[in-house]
Amino acid sequence: MNKIIIVDFGGQYAHLIARRIREIGVYSEIQNAEEFKLTEDTVGVIFSGGPQSVNDADLLTITTNIENIQVPILGICYGHQLIAKLSGGKVRAGVSREFGNTALHVLNTKSFLFSGTEDMQQVWMSHGDTVCELPPEFEITATTASTPIAAYQNSTGKIFGVQFHPEVVHSVYGKKILENFVSVCTNQRNWNVQTYYNSIVSEFQSLAAGKKLLLFISGGVDSLVAFALAVKAVGNDNIQALHIDTGFMRLNESEEVMDFLQSLGFSNIKLINAADKFIAAVKNVVEPEEKRKIIGKLFVDVIQSEMRLMESNNHNWMLVQGTIYPDTIESGGTKSSGTIKTHHNRVEEIKELMAQNRVIEPLKELYKDEVREIGTFLGLPEHLVWRRPFPGPGLAVRLLCSHGEIDTPAPIELTSIADIAATYSYPSDILPVKSVGVQGDFRTYNQPVVLWQAPEDTTTWKYLFHCAGSIINSVEGINRVVYSPVALDEMPNLLPAYITTERIELLKKVDSVVQKMTAHIKEIWQLPVISLPLFDMNGNECFVLRPVCSSDAMTANVYEMDIALLRDIADAIHQIPGTSYVFYDITTKPPGTIEWE
């Protein structure tokens, strides 16, 4: 079978490229850059993005001479820059950063890569470095306002480079561009979703045959589909499923999870109430990564306790996890990828079990929408398959904490922010809190800018997004922009705030209001509600709404909520005692992650 090799340079989307090629109908295989090797059935090669700079002394590259690669090559982001450098061009560092939606102008409409696309099109960018000088016998095929060489091809029409990411859904013609590249490589299309599904089921049955299985189930679609596959592989009697109430679930969620699992006919499900243990473990923890790792370790402690009970009767057991690919890549799961945030199913204790071959992860190669396809195929109810995602650590990572001060190693250009915001007629300021982001495949931990109601009340999403993008791309130390639907009469204060039962209960109430008032909006893929350690003069707490549109969690657009509905939601939240300003996150992913921690 013909295949296209994806050379992984550690980019957040390397696996997504492989998935897109499979969707087109050609088998794809990921190879680490250090292990890159052509085989007889290789018909094309794609160089992925990555967090490094090609100007680094220890740049990540291939050992094969690029001139000896006789099949078509496509470079994406870092790969685009690396091909240019290896072929004799030059790359300049950090002059024109671009993150998120960007307008691309196709210069060479005869370029086969852009065949069937528009001269002006929207693409998805996430980069700092840019190609500033082309190699000999290369030509520019597309440009943007900030990046003169946004795409190129060589004179033979077999080597291509694009600075943007065609593999993400937000590049409007991205799939067509990849299809065009595949057509340069081969005319065969013999790989499909059914083939891939059969391989997942076959592998799971092989690994699980004759084993007892232990599975943690949160109630989300990933663990639910993993559970259904486990039942299909070995039957209910050979499975012990656990639902752990960490105290960080949504309002009444643990009871609802148990009810719907039993209604589906699943058995051997055990509810463990460990709220006191989890809350106590993180009560004074502020740093997001430390919080995630502590929670992840506690999950393992509970699981291992259950495993010891199982071992007393049967030593032949394995742990099943509903890990999906974004969990792995954001946790730094490949040799070259940067760690954005550590997921609870990728803490060191889980890695030790994996090294002992005691973990089965039937969904580890899939994205959220692919998991949903399998859930539908298995006959799971639609309302469960399409349930909004909820993080494993639950509300603990949506409850931001603080010692009452913020570390700002470099001064932020307040004047630049104010000037940009004023161009769009928005008052602005910087919120004294930090959140996790992803910029150029690296983790960032920076402050957000807040914009609020324009004096003339001319707010439009287009203006807000343009303003947010201009600020983030121009000002160091900023990775998010939020919007307040009401004027800020006073800036909230950063105060010492930790995980307490009282803050958790307040967040549960606010989250419940938001989820109910937006349940009818199918376009919202996920809607985190974040509690900030920011308080008004009366000690009332501020919150952020983060509704996003996505399919695979690797990228996300902001949902353009009706402003009247946003104000209604804010008013409903203000009816809950202890609440203050409600902000609306208007940052795409990248540069902001979907969650704030």
Image (cartoon, rainbow, N blue to C red):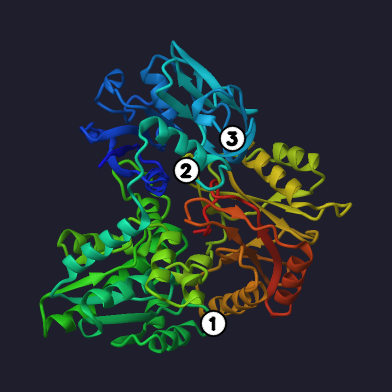
Give the side of residue 60 with respect to residue 591, left or right. Answer: left
Q: What residue does disc 2 label?
A: 167
Amino acid at dot 2: Glu
- Find disc 3 in the rendering and name its residue: 117
Q: Is residue 401 above or below residue 233?
A: above
**Callout 1 environment at 10 Å: few (<14), some (14 to 19), or many (20+)?**
some
The disc, 3 or 1, on the residue closer to the chain's N-terminal end is: 3
Nearer mark to the viewer, of 3 and 2? 3
Give the CA separation, mark 3 to mark 2: 15 Å
Tell me where residue 262 sits by quadrant. bottom left
Q: Which quadrant, please, contains the N terminus?
A: top left
In-front residue for pair 164/297: 164
In the displayed image of the protein, which residue is found farthest to the right?
Answer: 456
The residue located at (39%, 37%) in the rendering is 48
Along the viewing direction, whichever of 315 and 71 lies nearer the viewer: 71
How far apart are the two marked residues, 2 and 1, measured between alpha carbons? 37 Å
Give the residue drawn at x 78%, y 59%.
Answer: 488
Reading the image, the residue beneath label 1 is 251
Above-or-below relation of 511 to 62? below
Question: Which mark is first along the chain, 1 or 2?
Answer: 2
At 51% from the left and 76% from the top, the residue drawn is: 383
- What's the mark number on residue 196? none
Mark 3, secondary structure of its residue: loop
Quote the CA–CA distance across marks 3 and 1: 47 Å
Numbered disc 1: secondary structure: loop
Question: Disc 2 on helix, strand or loop?
Answer: loop
